[in-house]
Amino acid sequence: MDLKLIASLQQPADTKVVLLVMDGLGGLPIQTGGPTELEAANTPNLDALAALSMCGLHQPVAPGVTPGSGPAHLALFGYDPLTYQVQRGVLEALGVDFPLQRQDVAARGNFCTMDDEGRLTDRRAGRIPTEVGAKLCDLLGEIELPGVELFVWPVKDYRFLFVLRGPGLSDAVSETDPQMTGVPALEPQALKPEAAKTAELVQLFLEKAQAVLKDHHPANAMVLRGFAQTPDWPTFTEVYGMRAAAIALYPMYRGVAKLVGMEVLDVHGDLEDEFALLEQAWADYDFFFVHIKPTDSSGEDGAFDRKVGIIERVDALLPRLLALDPDVVVVTGDHSTPAALKSHSWHPVPAMLYAKTGRRDSVTRFGETACLSGGLGPHLPGCELLPLALAHAQRMKKFGA
């Protein structure tokens, strides 16, 4: 999408828009011919809303491309992820309110488990509790590197933030996470000549970190991914003219919302707490991004039934959102995470667009198969959903004479 065009067409309106994102919503049948997780769930409220909406499937990045969470969410915010690219490190830093400076290099870290042969056996170290990860971060933060400052901050569970601060750094460094088990971690490589110094510092840190972690099973190793520096982009308010709030429990998603200039509201607890905060903040904002994480983590764990259960919990909470009388509601996922694959996938994602000014199609059941025949189409570019929502909220004026 051309954000300059969108910004030139924005107009004020007394309307409210909600983007409800069930992370990793799209799925696959666990058995041939069976239902997906969404289709297996009992979702009377989502189905009723679908019957009043335009439905379809959106493509987060491009056909056949499996998206990461960062680009997938940027697409939902209307930022073309092929144009606006940022790696995971910056998103993690913003998500935990780290005071990131323009030239800092940040990366997302995973504590993981390594066997005696140096091969990864669990990329998430058994999903260790956050308090255990925080203690390990304290130990790693004591490592000294020549000519730079080092910061190691806990994020959540097995995740942590790694930041280098100093002159002459570059984010053009390859990841050390092979994103599979049964193989060793990768060595960081300079992807550009000017990144040679940074790659050497990362390698030195990894060597020292391995010596620190070797006896801390299951988190006896670590990998780094998404080396990044802060980009300079137009903000959500500049483009869309809306006061935007983000409600998300996980730091990464708080980070991507903050990256585009949303105000991130403070929330703790569970799904119910997110909807309670939405109710409390309703009068203060025009746009709400509400993020649901456990659908994605259930899919990554291969837990089909658990993912079904999370979808059903969201369905039960949906009437609280609708009772607020929003003008536009978009319900979708950022990408697909089928339990059958235990990972993100390239499959298009179910989406519905409800609006007081909207039309409806013939879809009466919110699921992958039903959405194939919906009015939004089977391959809508993900970054086109928000401009459609903006138009239905009467926040875009006519283009041209």
Image: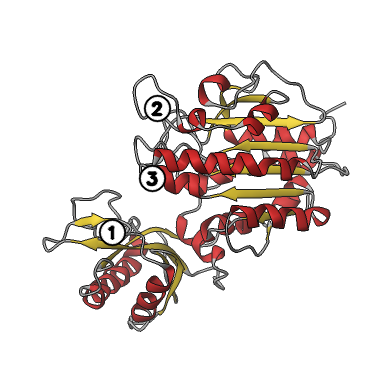
Q: Which labelled disc corresponds to residue 29?
A: 2
Pick the residue in front: 2 or 92.
92
Instruction: Name the residue at 38% across, 38% down.
Output: 339
The amino acid type found where label 3 is placed reads Glu
Please, what secondary structure does the residue beneath circle 1 have?
loop
Q: Which residue is mark 1?
A: 189
- Taking the image as shown, residue 202 lies to the left or right of residue 100, namely left
Pick the residue in front: 328 or 382.
328
x, y percent for residue 67: 45, 41
Q: Give the Cα separation between the discs numbered 1 and 2.
A: 39 Å
What is the image's colouring?
secondary structure
Pick the residue in front: 290 or 225.
290
- Taking the image as shown, residue 305 lies to the left or right of residue 49, namely left
Instruction: Name the residue at 52% across, 57% down.
Output: 252
User: Which comes before the other along the chain, label 3 or label 1?
Assistant: 1
Q: Which residue is mark 3?
A: 300
Question: Which quarter of the picture shows residue 362?
Answer: top right
Please, what secondary structure does the residue beneath circle 3 have?
helix
The total of numbered circles placed on residues is 3
The amino acid type found where label 2 is placed reads Pro
